[in-house]
Amino acid sequence: MSDTRYLAQGPRTAIRPFTRGDADEFTARARESAALHRPWLFPPATPEAFAAYAGVLIEDPTKAGFLVCERDGAGAIAGFVTINNIVAGAFRCGALGYGAFAHAAGRGLMGEGLELVLDHAFGLLALHRLEANVQPDNAGSIALARRAGFRLEGYSPDFLHIDGAWRDHERWAITAEMR
Ligand SMILES: CC(C)(COP(=O)(O)OP(=O)(O)OC[C@H]1O[C@@H](n2cnc3c(N)ncnc32)[C@H](O)[C@@H]1OP(=O)(O)O)[C@@H](O)C(=O)NCCC(=O)NCCS
């Protein structure tokens, strides 16, 4: 596949930046995936919410967003990985978010897509460290981070306000040296 939209390609997935034109597919998949995502994740499910979310990912240099697309067929969006709170200088760190879409979940596509994002982040983006802050009961997310080589650094009480309350999180992280 020589599709220039993609930043990187693996055997079954390819990653590309969010575009405003992804609104219809993304929001339809997000609505289909609510049972998978709740109570951990609340991706945009309406055109208005997507416009705000994607606009920030596209324009804000402290964020980067990647769609994980299937290489089979028309390149359907299997899920997404975001990097938030990107800090340069001596830190060169960002905080990951990710979600699979229900039709693609559990097939190893997110694992492969996350590997592509890590290569991109430690390569072209020149980051040194990525965090994944995960609620302790979120077994699927912890499994994904662990499989990608993240290590458990610690425990952060009342770390993020999600679904109406401050939630404790485990802090998983990976550095460039660990790749
Ligand atoms: C976390 C999440 C993104 C993981 O996505 P996923 O689609 O399940 O990820 P993968 O398919 O890559 O991996 C899941 C399983 O598929 C397995 N798998 C199936 N087919 C596979 C294949 N061909 N190749 C590799 N792995 C495969 C993996 O081994 C893994 O199994 P395990 O966890 O039991 O060891 C997804 O569960 C999700 O969206 N959760 C809700 C949102 C969320 O929690 N986001 C993070 C907030 S911190």
Image (cartoon, rainbow, N blue to C red):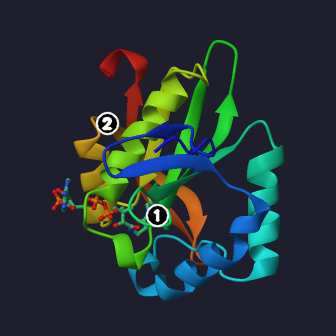
**Residue at image location 44% in from the left, 29% down from the top:** 119
Report the Cα–Cα distance between label 2 and label 1.
Answer: 17 Å
Q: Amino acid at mark 2?
A: Phe
Quadrant position of the N terminus in the picture: top left
Residue 150: give its label.
2
User: Which label lies toward us, 2 or 1?
Assistant: 1
- Is label 1's Cβ within 8 Å of ligand 1? yes
Looking at the image, residue 91 sits to the left or right of residue 153; the answer is: right
Percent across and percent down for residue 104 are: 36, 71
Q: What residue did someone put label 1 on?
A: 99
| Contact check, label 2 and label 1, Cβ < 8 Å | no
Q: Relative to residue 145, is residue 134 depicted above or below?
A: below
Percent across and percent down for residue 87 are: 68, 28
Q: Amino acid at mark 1?
A: Gly
Count of labels in the image: 2
Q: Is residue 53 visible?
A: yes
**Residue at image location 23% in from the left, 44% down from the top:** 147
Q: Is residue 155 visible?
A: no
Residue lying farthest to the front in this orientation = 2
Q: Nearer the viewer, residue 84 or 99?
A: 99
**First reached walking from the N terminus: tag 2 or tag 1:** 1
Q: Relative to residue 66, is residue 162 depicted above or below?
A: below
Percent across and percent down for residue 8 are: 49, 37
Q: Relative to residue 45, is residue 52 depicted above or below?
A: above
Q: Nearer the viewer, residue 28 or 174?
A: 28
Tell me the crowding category of disc 2: few under 14, some 14 to 19, or many 20 or more residues within 10 angstroms, Cα based. Answer: many
**Residue at image location 42% in from the left, 38% down from the top:** 116
